Image: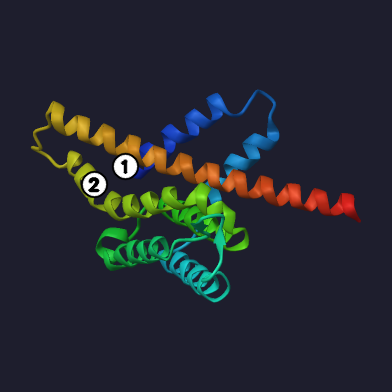
Amino acid sequence: MLPHATLYDDALRVLCAAVRETRIKEGDEDGKAQLQQFLKCKATVQQVSDSAADLQQETGRVYSSKKLGEKEIISQKWIDNIMANIGNAMAIGDNLLHATPESVSMAWFCVKLGLKAIQSKHQLYSLFGSGLTSMTEIMILVPHYNQLYDERQKPGLQSNDLIDKLFRDVVDVYVAVLDFLYAIKRHVEARTLATMRHGKCQS
C-alpha cells in the first residue's frame, strides 16, 4: 500500500509544476538545476534558531545605534518575533514534526538562508523581513493542518465542501510559502554570483 499524500507533498507538487511551467523555459538546464538544488536543501528548526540568534547578536552589537535613513536598519521587535516563532515551532514537539516530509526541512533551510543574507547585508531586511515573519508563523500552523489533512484517509470520515475548501486553501498557503522561500534562495544566489563576478572584474 502506497503512503497517502500529505499537505506538504501536495503543495510541493503544485509548486514544482508551476515553476517548471512558468519559470523554466525549454532547454533551460540552469533553471532545472536550480529547482533540483532547492528540493535538496535541508535545515532543522534548531539551525534556524541559531541563525536568528547570530543575527540578533550581530545587530545588537554593531548596529544598535545606527539607522538607515530615518528607519532602524533592523527592528529589534522583528528579531524578537522571529525568535518567538521559532521557539514555538520547536515547542510543537516530535509528535507533530516527526517524519514530516523533506519540504519542511527545505522550507526551514530557506528561512535560515534569508536570515543569513540579512546578516551579511542588512538592507535586505526591508525585502525579506516581513515575509520571513509570516513564514515562521505559518510553519507553526502547518503541522496542525497536516494532521487534519491526514484525517481524510480515515474510514467513515464525512467530507463536505467546507472541509474540502479548507484543505485547498491550506495547500495554497503552503505553496505560497515555498514559492517565497524559493525566491529568497534564487535572489541570494544571484546576488552572491554577481558579487563574485564584480570581484573578478576588479582584480
Q: Nearer the viewer, residue 29 or 51?
A: 51
- Dividing the picture into quadrants, the one containing residue 166 is top left
State the SS at label 1: helix
Q: Residue at x 54, y 42 (%)?
A: 183
Q: Does residue 158 appear anywhere in the picture?
A: yes
Q: Residue at x 23, y 52 (%)?
A: 144
Compared with 142, 164 (above or below) is above
> Where does residue 115 sit, x and y in percent of width and height?
52, 59
Label 2 packing within 10 angstroms: few (<14), some (14-19), many (20+): some
Q: Nearer the viewer, residue 128 or 136?
A: 128
Compared with 69, 55 (above or below) is below
State the SS at label 2: helix
Label 1 close to label 2 by CB (< 8 Å)? yes
Check disc 2 and give the amino acid type: Tyr
Residue where numbered disc 2 is placed: 145
The count of marks equals 2
Residue where numbered disc 1 is placed: 7
For marks 1 and 2, give the one nearer the viewer: 2
Question: Along the horizontal axis of the image, is 130 left or right of 155?
Answer: right
Whole-number angstrom distance, CA of label 1 to CA of label 2: 8 Å
Q: Residue at x 54, y 62 (%)?
A: 67
Q: Does residue 41 appear anywhere in the picture?
A: no
